Amino acid sequence: ATPTSIMVATGRAGELGVLFRRGEALQSLASVAVMAFDKTGTLTEGRPEVTDLVVAPGEEEAAVLALAAAVEARSEHPIARAIVAAASARGLAVAEAERFESVPGFGAVAEVAGRRVAVGSARHLERLGIDPGPLAEAALLLARKGRTPLLVADGDRCVAAIAVADPVKPSAPAALSALRGMGLRIAMVTGDNRKAAEAIAESLGIVDVVAEVPPEGKVEAIAALRSGGRTVAFVGDGLNDAPVLASADVGLAVGTGTDVAIESAEVVLMSGDLRAVVTAVALSRATLRNIG
Ligand code: ADP
Ligand code: MG
């Protein structure tokens, strides 16, 4: 590709809401064979809401939700915001948490009124040495419905399962079918619960699903998709997606996402609308054809 043709194409892309931060990305995108997507905030709206709250015997819903919200008030994760919003919708008083720690891809933990409180996936609790107990079953049932299950531990005891649901973006089905029509293979790579991820993937016709992976696991998943010399692009939005955006052959960041994701990507989609991915691929192919 000549510098001029790349300049013209990147200019046109900009008008269509696709920012090519590096001209080379325009060329690598034309030969992409696999388009891998993060789930939360990329294929879905990224604005999850609490849908279910199941408490252990003897626990009170309001008290448990307030405890979880105290921890999550310190986190930036969309799930955390959903839990805080649910507590505030019920008018609950939320305590100040101390010694907050975020465990990317797993959850959060902090001290609330002198107790250690953890909120996150079943694996998050297990890593902290807490047995999820009977609530693991409740979490599994919620996940089968495509909701993300979280567990709340108060000290060493698992006291609640909370589910959050995040609707699929309206632009997703059309964008994915257009990409398939262009011969691309679609994959989902997510840190979310496997059952929840599979339910969303199935609704979008995605069969290649890698779930329950921490940020470094996303990098490994891309390396696996690359086997046989395939060019792999990744579309993501989160703080967790920064490493994988940098390691993919082409990283595309959703512009509504975190600054870290945007800085790690070669292509920035100005809106959250996934049809911009189709535009980006179509433009890069057209540019290379013109100079072919
Ligand atoms: P995704 O890849 O779908 O964007 P993440 O890697 O951000 O997901 O998170 C993966 C999983 O880790 C979540 O589904 C959730 O179970 C757990 N998790 C991460 N951060 C938090 C948090 N602050 N509160 C509760 N759960 C969390
Ligand atoms: Mg995300």
Image (cartoon, helix red, strand yellow):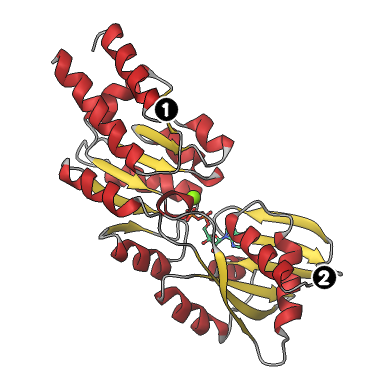
Q: Residue at x 40, y 35 (%)?
A: 252
Mark 1 CB within 8 Å of ligand 2: no
* Residue 233 seen anywhere in this rendered image of the structure: no
Circle 2 packing at 10 Å, graded few (<14), some (14-19), many (20+), is some
Q: Which residue is drawn at 75% across and 72% down?
A: 66
**Which numbered marker is on residue 208?**
none
Q: Which residue is drawn at 70% across and 69% down?
A: 89
Image quadrant containing the C terminus: top left
Q: Residue at x 45, y 60 (%)?
A: 212
Front residue (pair 54, 243): 54
* Residue identifier under label 2: 93
Q: What residue type is labelled 1?
A: Glu
Between discs 2 and 1, the one toward the N terminus: 2
Image quadrant containing the N terminus: top left
Q: What residue type is labelled 2?
A: Ala
Between circles 2 and 1, the one closer to the viewer is 2
In this rendering, the answer to whether 160 lies above or below 239 is below
Q: How far apart are marks 2 and 1 (CA)?
A: 43 Å
Circle 1 packing at 10 Å, graded few (<14), some (14-19), many (20+), is many
Q: Say which element carries label 2.
A: loop
- Image x and y of residue 122, in percent: 55, 71
**Which numbered marker is on residue 266?**
1
Quarter of the image for residue 97 reads: bottom right
Quarter of the image for residue 88 reads: bottom right
In this rendering, the answer to whether 10 lies above or below 187 is above
- Left/right placement of residue 1 relative to residue 60 reads left
